[in-house]
Image (spheres, rainbow, N blue to C red):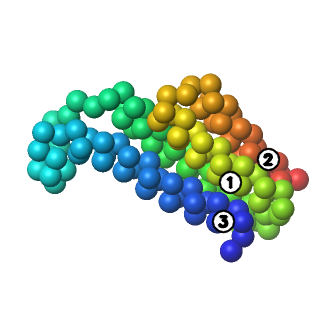
Amino acid sequence: MTTDLYCLLALALWSIVLNHVPAIARVSAAQSPIAWGLGNRDTVPEVKPWVGRADRAQRNHHDNLAMIMAVILIAQVSGQADAVTASASIALLGCRVLHGITYIFGIPTLRSLSYAASIGALGVIVWRILT
């Protein structure tokens, strides 16, 4: 398996973390945590603002994951994956994880920079596919 695919796997697994952080926070905040966690969740417990940011980080990651997956897989299938795409995939992975963490912790400038850098890394992979 290539570095690019390992990075894609790590990004897919990062989804599990981003899925569970806000869910665990809500279960912990519920009046009856077990009943709420196992129930239909018709009511939403009061939570701290970071939980809303965690939800948005999760949505952002899921919104971008399909595009990232498509680009990395196209590089693989087309035989364009190389050391440059591997480095770009590592940078992309690091930037996406940093983006999620800075989103949850409410660090807007670093969050935006990490997002922009991840798009730049994705652009490098696209550039290698097209050249």
| Point 72% across, 66% down: residue | 3
Instruction: Check disc 1 and give the amino acid type.
Output: Val
Instruction: Check disc 2 and give the amino acid type.
Output: Val
Quarter the N terminus occupies: bottom right
Q: Residues within 10 Å of mark 1 (few under 14, many from 20)?
A: some
Q: CA distance from mark 3 to mark 2?
A: 16 Å
| Point 11% across, 44% down: residue | 32
| Numbered disc in front, either 1 or 3 | 3
| Point 16% across, 47% down: residue | 33
Residue 19: horizontal and vertical position, in percent?
39, 49
Question: What secondary structure is found at the residue carrying circle 3?
Answer: helix
Tag 2 residue: 124
Please say whether residue 40 is visible from this viewpoint: no
Tag 1 residue: 71
| Numbered disc in front, either 2 or 1 | 2
In screen coordinates, is 52 left or right of 119?
left
Q: Where is 62 relative to 43, above or below?
A: below
Q: CA distance from mark 1 to mark 3?
A: 11 Å
In screen coordinates, is 19 left or right of 97?
left
Q: Earlier in the sequence, mark 2 or mark 1?
A: 1
Residue 9: horizontal and vertical position, in percent?
58, 63
Question: What secondary structure is found at the residue carrying circle 2?
Answer: helix
Q: Residues within 10 Å of mark 3 (few under 14, many from 20)?
A: some
| Residue nearest the viewer, comparing 36 with 131 | 36
Tag 3 residue: 5
Instruction: Check disc 3 and give the amino acid type.
Output: Leu
State the mark number for residue 54: none
Residue pushed farthest top? Answer: 109
Q: Earlier in the sequence, mark 1 or mark 3?
A: 3
Q: Earlier in the sequence, mark 3 or mark 2?
A: 3
Q: CA distance from mark 2 to mark 1?
A: 10 Å
| Point 52% across, 58% down: residue | 12
